[in-house]
Amino acid sequence: MNETTDPNSQILLVAIIAFYWAMLSSWSQLLSRWNDTRTNRAAAPTRGDGDIEHPGDSPLDALREIDTQFDLAEFLHGAKMAYEAVLRAYAESDIQTLRCLVGPEVLDVFEREVAGRRDREEMLQLTFIGTREAKVVDAVVEDGTAKIVVRYVSEVVSVTRSADSAIIAGDPLQLVEVIDSWTFACHIPSMRRNWMLIATEGE
């Protein structure tokens, strides 16, 4: 998406990101609302967003022992929204939004990348097509913090342009498959369940 868009588009983007953040910041309320109807389905070995490809015990068992209201399907719903929101904010150099969604180490990387792009007078145009798959591949509870690793398979159109709009990288007519593993964490005593992105890894 172009970093310099018309005011109406900017207003719409801010509203969308605000909605995403509101969803993330009230995670525990969402989990509570959906727990009764989806817990059994999320734990079942069926294919879909909540599928966990682990033999035996689920990697989420330790988290469920601490938070009986945890619902995998709703967590992944929020995680997918966070994924798109972070990608859009990064492409648009929206550091303020990134500060709300990611931890200090990830934010530092994003800030350096955005600063480098600005120094080179480059512009990243990102069109997010959608997430084909989002599934939990690991989960741990340690030192009072819950951590969940989500593997995403998504499609985007990404183009980097110079100050004179020349294409430096990417193709505006080509869909690119992106595979990422993102680690989300929250402090267990927090009643708000503010899940933050603390690590990213691409494949």
Image: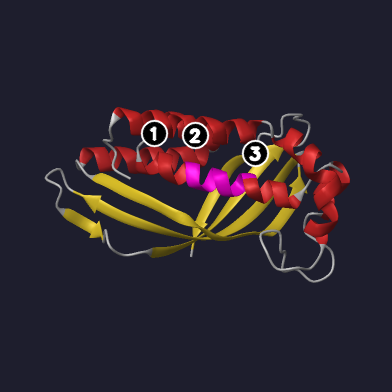
Do the residues under discs 1 and 2 have CB atoms within 8 angstroms?
yes
**Which of the two marks, 2 or 3, is nearer to us in this view?**
2
The alpha-carbon separation of the residues under discs 1 and 2 comes to 11 Å
Q: Amino acid at mark 2?
A: Ile
* In magenta stretch: residue 106: no
Q: Which residue is mark 3?
A: 195
**The residue stretch that appears in magenta:** 78-85
- Disc with the residue nearer the chain's start (1 vs 3): 1
Q: Residue visible at 26% across and 61% down?
A: 171
- Disc with the residue nearer the chain's start (2 vs 3): 2
Label 2, secondary structure: give it: helix
Q: Amino acid at mark 1?
A: Asp
Q: Is residue 66 left or right of residue 7?
A: right
The alpha-carbon separation of the residues under discs 2 and 3 comes to 15 Å
Q: Residue visible at 63% across and 36% down?
A: 24
Could you tell me residue 195's position as x and y percent?
Answer: 65, 39
Split into 4 quadrants, where in the image is the N terminus?
top left
- Label 1 CA crowd tier, 10 Å (few <14, some 14–19, many 20+): some
Q: Between residues 30 and 91, which one lies in front from this camera angle?
A: 30
Q: Which residue is mark 1?
A: 94
Q: Which residue is mark 2?
A: 17
- Disc with the residue nearer the chain's start (1 vs 2): 2
Label 3, secondary structure: give it: loop
Label 1, secondary structure: give it: loop
Q: Main secondary structure of the magenta part?
A: helix
Could you tell me residue 140's position as x and y percent?
Answer: 74, 52
